[in-house]
Amino acid sequence: MNIRILKDRTARDIMLVLTLLSIVMVADIAIGLYLKSKPVLESESLWTLLFSSEWKPLKGRFGFLPFLMGTVWVTLLSITIALPISLLTAVFLTEYARPIIKKFVFPVLDILAALPSVIYGVWGVLVIVPWISKSVAPHFVDFSTGYTVLAAGIVLSVMVVPLLVSLFIEVFSSVPVELREASLSLGATRWQTALRVVMRKSLAGILASSVLAVSRAMGETIAVLMVCGCVVGLPHGLLDTCYPIPAVIANNYGEMLSIPLYESALMFAALMLFAVVLIFNLVSRVVLYRIEKQNE
Amino acid sequence: MKVSRNKKIKENVAKLLMWLSMAIVVVLVVSVVWTVFSKGAKAMSWDMVSKLPGGGFYIGKEGGFLNAIVGSLMIVGASTVLGLLVSIPVVLFLNVYLHKESRLAYVVRLAFDVLFGVPSIVYGAFGFTLMIWFGLRTSLLGGIIVITLLIIPIFVRTMDEASRNFPRGILDACLSLGATRWETLKVVVRQIAPGIATATLLSVGRAIGDAASVMFTAGYTDSIPTSLSQPAATLPLAVFFQLSSPIPEVVDRAYAAALVLTIIVLLISIAGRFITSHFSRHKV
């Protein structure tokens, strides 16, 4: 009897330790990155780091504004494209679609979610970039290579769609069927029900899911790096090149070791990314948990 | 009457838009897969997947990218084993030892959801600082460590989702017969085994395609690593580096590598679906 209980206790304790260790990871990442970015934080004020656009690593000038703006442009564009498509697809799949259509669309979304980001990069380089360079850009500017904010935004939006659709479907399914029935029985059409009952009821969930998708888009590296152009400078429009933060980190990892402050600056970039993603994730997950709980 | 016609029009417009957006999604998937397959098939040959890069490989001479395939499999294989060793206990702890309303379970799930959302480039940067801390160079070991860190949250999240809905009644029945919680695991594991298998496959699929994290930590090399301290090539990086080459033959190899990567990921995804639908015989 005692041995059985002892076994149970030991197993529990080991599992508890493993679990706690994994939670500590979140703090570890933050601390590790902070320690590494300390030198650059000491040499320049936070204000200069965030809002100066002077990027001269050799002279020790690190203004992240061009990269921050690159990230903002690309992320916002990708969400603007992905949001309506995902919302309509999710409404269709939960409110309209017959089982046979779901059987066809779900695997398609699975494939979209499973493909690695480098594959999207290849697709962007082969399909989207030439398309922008040949068909879109000539209407607006004299010349563009196609490596633009627009290209990065389109590629990212494709990558975000499966995530958004699956989150939306979960949120919509948590709306009680009775509410839909009540609305339909009063003579509302299905679209009216979807818009004024289902979507209104899941507004918080839609927002939380979108924030989650924004944070996913913000951290995406390789695919964006391949199509964004990677020229340091503030983007002024959709057909400008851009240089989002993850791309900067990935592109400069080789040379950064030779200049100590440079490495520190790139780690600061990673820390910024981590902090924003952390906050976005915490907020949206807490909201989504609440919705899930109502559902039970 | 006018109102009812109005709402009918709206209904149809909405329906049209929904069909349109679904069509866009499907067309995009077809476009991505078709691009990779058509470009990759042209560049594909047996040499590509069976040979190491030869002397003049990067100016378009003979050789293949076996180094990248083997490197990827080594890193992902080792990380999967390490990741499972950590995440299976965590998932069992969450679902068997902790109560459903437990505060700790809530915090743990939240922490893993956050870790799941951390971009792989941040894992790469963090792994890189860890490696400097321990005095490691870019190496197979570094790649394994970072991919393990990356894969654990994916494992825990997907497995937890799969095991959350197993019938609590079974657990209660075991406990009422006098079993300790540890002993109930024999029954519980059988219930959630297909879920764990699927979760493993999905996570492996994501880990093998991740480029940003191994870029810092595993490095790149033309040979197959023979020890943990040597750098290792990986498939996503093989695609990425070769695609930026100005020489057409080398770019072709990037397409071939992309095709291999896509096929691996798609096979894994199909296998995951198959397991979920066919191996649930112990399920109550």
Image (cartoon, rainbow, N blue to C red):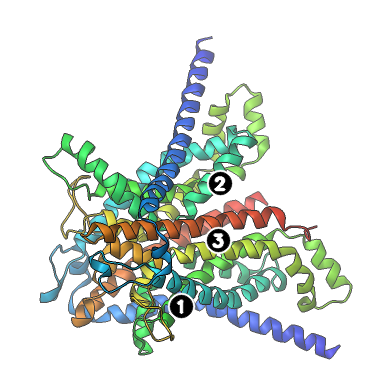
Q: Position of residue B52 (x, y in %)?
A: 37, 72
CA distance separating discs 1 and 2: 30 Å
Q: Nearer the viewer, residue A50 or B213?
A: B213
Q: Is residue B95 left or right of residue A32?
A: right
Local crowd at mark 1 within 10 Å, few (<14), some, or many (≥20)? many
Dot 2 falls on which chain? A
Label 1 sits on a secondary structure element that is helix
Q: Is residue A286 left or right of residue A224?
A: right
**Residue of label 3:** B202
**Residue of label 1:** B144
The residue at the point 50 percent across, 22 percent down is B12
B181 to A231, vertically: above or below: below
CA distance separating discs 3 and 1: 18 Å
B207 to A185, vertically: above or below: below
Dot 3 falls on which chain? B
Query: Which residue type carries mark 1?
Result: Ile
Query: Which residue type carries mark 3?
Result: Leu
Q: Position of residue B234 (x, y in %)?
A: 39, 70
**Residue of label 2:** A107
Dot 1 falls on which chain? B
The residue at the point 29 percent across, 51 percent down is A125
